[in-house]
Image (spheres, grey):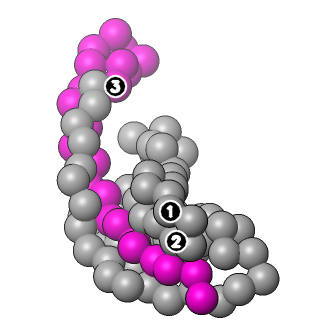
């Protein structure tokens, strides 16, 4: 199952001057090396505009389980781990 099939980074909580972004990561790769981290940081930069931002905390967020249909007609259950970044624009 390729990473292209997973949802990317999403802004899941939005406040006036910050929020929380989550993204999936693979066990062997870890959250800091995930290609979705770059996407998450880009979402933060867009939200904050020309202001800088501060990461208040980050850590593993609630994951999800989804069922994927395979070419052979079988289904596979995928357990996604997710990483969250809480940020505040300055």
How many numbered marks, from 0 up? Answer: 3
Q: CA distance from mark 3 to mark 2?
A: 33 Å
The residue that appears at 21% across and 30% down in the rendered structure is 77
Of the 4 image quadrants, the one containing the C terminus is bottom right
With respect to residue 34, does 57 lie above or below?
below
Q: Are marks 3 and 2 in contact (CB under 8 Å)?
A: no
The residue that appears at 42% across and 18% down in the rendered structure is 71
Q: Nearer the viewer, residue 2 or 49?
A: 49
Q: Is residue 83 magenta?
A: yes
Q: Which residue bears the numbered disc 2? A: 18
The mark closer to the camera, 3 or 1, is: 1
Of the 4 image quadrants, the one containing the N terminus is top left
Neighbour class for label 3 at 10 Å: few (<14), some, many (≥20)? few
Q: Nearer the viewer, residue 84 or 3?
A: 84
Q: Which residue bears the numbered disc 1? A: 15
- Does 79 sit left or right of 24 as displayed? left
The region drawn magenta spans 68-90
Say what secondary structure mark 1 lies in: strand
- Does 44 sit left or right of 74 as displayed? right
Q: Which residue bears the numbered disc 3? A: 68
Q: Are marks 2 and 1 in contact (CB under 8 Å)?
A: yes
Residue farthest to the front, as pictured:
16
Give the quadrant of residue 64.
Answer: top left
Say what secondary structure mark 2 lies in: strand
Give the quadrant of residue 22.
Answer: bottom left
């Amino acid at each position: 199952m390729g990473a292209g099939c997973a949802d990317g980074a999403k802004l899941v909580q939005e406040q006036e001057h910050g929020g929380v972004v989550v993204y999936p990561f693979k066990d062997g790769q870890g959250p800091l090396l995930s290609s979705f981290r770059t996407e998450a940081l880009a979402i933060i930069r867009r939200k904050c505009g020309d202001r800088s931002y501060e990461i208040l905390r980050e850590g593993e967020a609630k994951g999800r389980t989804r069922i994927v249909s395979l070419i052979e007609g079988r289904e596979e259950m995928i357990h996604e781990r997710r990483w969250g970044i809480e940020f505040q624009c300055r």
